[in-house]
Image (cartoon, grey):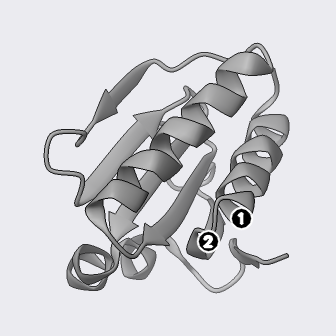
Amino acid sequence: MEAKEKVKIICDTLLAKKAHNVIKIDVSEQTILADYFIIASGKSNPQVKALAEYAEEAVEKAGGEVRRKEGFTDCRWIVVDFGDVILHVFHDETRLFYNLERLWVNGTNAETIED
């Protein structure tokens, strides 16, 4: 499964499940870790967990796989590694604190995903 297909599945799933501030960042020129980061927020720990689980389930249903996942214990910042796409689902306050966008967005490589 191609990275762009995974990105679409993940973003569509996040929006359908009421994630907010969803952003897709093309990091292919900045790191070898992945081609895309997707960052999204949830308003509560249970929502953060559910968003990550729904995205994981949607990608697996389409034939993709999860290589690694972290953060399900406290659900403040969950990272799901799909290989060439890495999903970061944050609780609102945690996202503001870490501000990953500041580190990875260079002005031309990010897109806000909306309905």
In the rendered image, residue 46, in percent from the top left (x then y), is placed at: 33, 56
Quick one: quadrant of the C terminus? bottom right
Comes first in the chain, label 1 or label 2: 1
In the rendered image, residue 106, in percent from the top left (x then y), is placed at: 57, 80
As drawn, 112 above or below 51 = below
Disc 1 + disc 2, Cβ < 8 Å:
yes
Q: Is residue 87 visible?
A: no
Residue type at the position of mark 1:
Leu
In the rendered image, residue 34, in percent from the top left (x then y), is placed at: 54, 39
Q: Secondary structure at mark 1?
A: helix
As drawn, 86 above or below 16 = above
Q: Disc 1 to disc 2, how far (Cα)?
A: 8 Å
- Which residue in the structure is indicated by mark 1? 15
User: Residue at the spot x=62%, y=64% of the render?
Assistant: 25
User: Residue at the spot x=55%, y=29% of the render?
Assistant: 82
- Which residue in the structure is indicated by mark 2? 22
User: Residue at the spot x=27%, y=57% of the render?
Assistant: 77
Q: Secondary structure at mark 2?
A: strand
